[in-house]
Amino acid sequence: MQHYLILCRSLTYAQRAQRAVERAGGSGTVVKAPQEVTGGGCTYGVRVPAGKLDIAMAAIQRAGLPTGKTYIYETDGTLREVRV
Amino acid sequence: MIYLDSAATSFQKPPAVYEAVERAMRTMASPGRGGHEPAMLAADLALDCRCDAAELFRMDAPENVVFTFNATHALNIAINSLVRPGDKVVVSGYEHNSVMRPLRLRGANVTVASSPLFCPAEMEAAFAAALPGAKAAVCTVMSNVFGYITPIDDIAELCQKNGVPLIIDAAQGAGNMDIDWKALAAAFIAMPGHKGLLGPQGTGLLLCAQQGMPFMAGGTGSDSKNPDMPDYLPDRMEAGTHNISGIAGLREGIRYVRERRPKEIGRHEAVLMRRLAENLRKISGMEVFLAENEAVQGGVLSVRHELVGCEALAECLGAAGVAVRSGLHCAPCAHQTAGTTHTGTVRFSISPFNTEEEINQAAEITKACVKKLLIDRK
């Protein structure tokens, strides 16, 4: 299944984002973001299934939580930035 | 043992605290250090604890709950963040060395808003007079020596009117008083985890309205290429590995307090303190520092005897199975204000787990100790 990765500024924000998504009926997993996309070094994000990105983004925004860039996992495992 | 030294460290904890500490040590690693299960379990626990604390203190943002190692650590961060050398800082006359020493180390120009014991209107007036020109103010919610509940709501309002950021030392009030972050609008509120919140030693919380200056710098598991500490909470203020087993215990302590409700715990402690005070007053030569107004004293009671030294009395009590503390209780400022510096006091401090029977026994044992020590003197 295809997934998206929503970058967050820190582990705490990623956790809060994930909980907001789950409260909204979506699903997400907190993951350590690959170095290739973090820019500033280690950070975390929320991985959500394709088709659930809209629900997730809406839930995160409703919770007032800042997010970074969003990526889609390509079939070869690499990440490509997407506009949301 | 009858443990009456909870103002230093609460000794009896809810059973869930002990269990959580062990579970964390057996199953958890460190938040923000990996994506594996032990690390993520620790991360979940840390956020749960922040959320529970945020709800207890009516904060919206759990990320503004920063873990520290004790209240002293939290106060040092807060003072370091707001105070520059030479700044005028107003404090109450009941502050602990965890406030006074960091201010001195920082080179602050400290103004003590001195006021008599158990006189909240006078304390408010002293703050009102002292605040103009101040860069910060620090005030305890309850004296660790006398249990004096300060008029913190009024002082917070005065600070707001004067545009002076306020640091609140909630070391004695967290867990047994309603502390409302939004209503107080303080810059920082500092507290230990190991007293009224019933967590393990080595835990504390700093509630932050702003980011502040890191007191320590180091790894945070975030923003690693940045040579400086991250510019967001809680990471900015939490360098190094967390005391996750302590945080696990603290979370259970906070859950217990929320369930039993701080105000109810405070009432229980104050009722027992008053009963103890009334019994100790019957001992000839005993001076008991009891407020006439019940609303201004929590579950902490200081006494001293005109002939028996405080250390001797505390030692006798300890030998008889009553744990209390004697001396200046790391708060010479409070003793100076109350006029007890030359003798110190013996302090009895109550926990949610103390019973009326224990209090009655403690009073009887105190009476017997005084009697014995007076005989020994002859």
Image: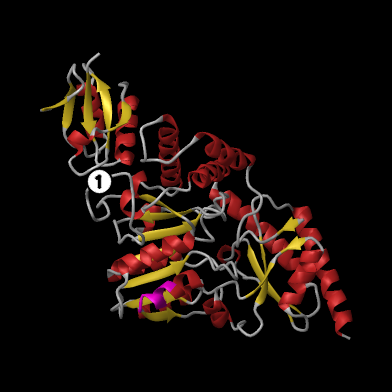
Question: In the rendered structure, does residue B105 fall within the stretch colored magenta?
Answer: yes
Q: Is residue B172 left or right of residue B206?
A: right
Write down the region rendered in magenta: B102-107
Q: Position of residue B229 (x, y in %)?
A: 27, 54
CA neighbours of label 1 inside 10 A, class few (<14), some (14 to 19), many (20+): many
For label 1, the residue is B223
* Amino acid type, residue under disc 1 in the picture: Asp
User: Across the whole image, how many numbered discs are drawn on residues?
Assistant: 1
Whether B76 is drawn above or below B130: the answer is above
Residue ranking furthest to the left: A83
Q: Quick one: SS at disc 1?
A: loop
Instruction: Give the residue drawn at x 59%, y 66%.
Output: B147
Q: Residue at x 69, y 63 (%)?
A: B274
Query: Pointer 1 indicates a residue of which chain?
Result: B
Say which residue appears at 62% left-offset and 82% top-offset. B340
Residue B325 x, y percent position in the rendering = 67, 68
Secondary structure mostly taken by the magenta-highlighted segment of the chain: helix
Tell me if I can see residue B292 in this picture: yes
- In x, y percent, where is residue B332? 55, 78
Q: Could one spot residue B287 in this view of the protein?
A: no
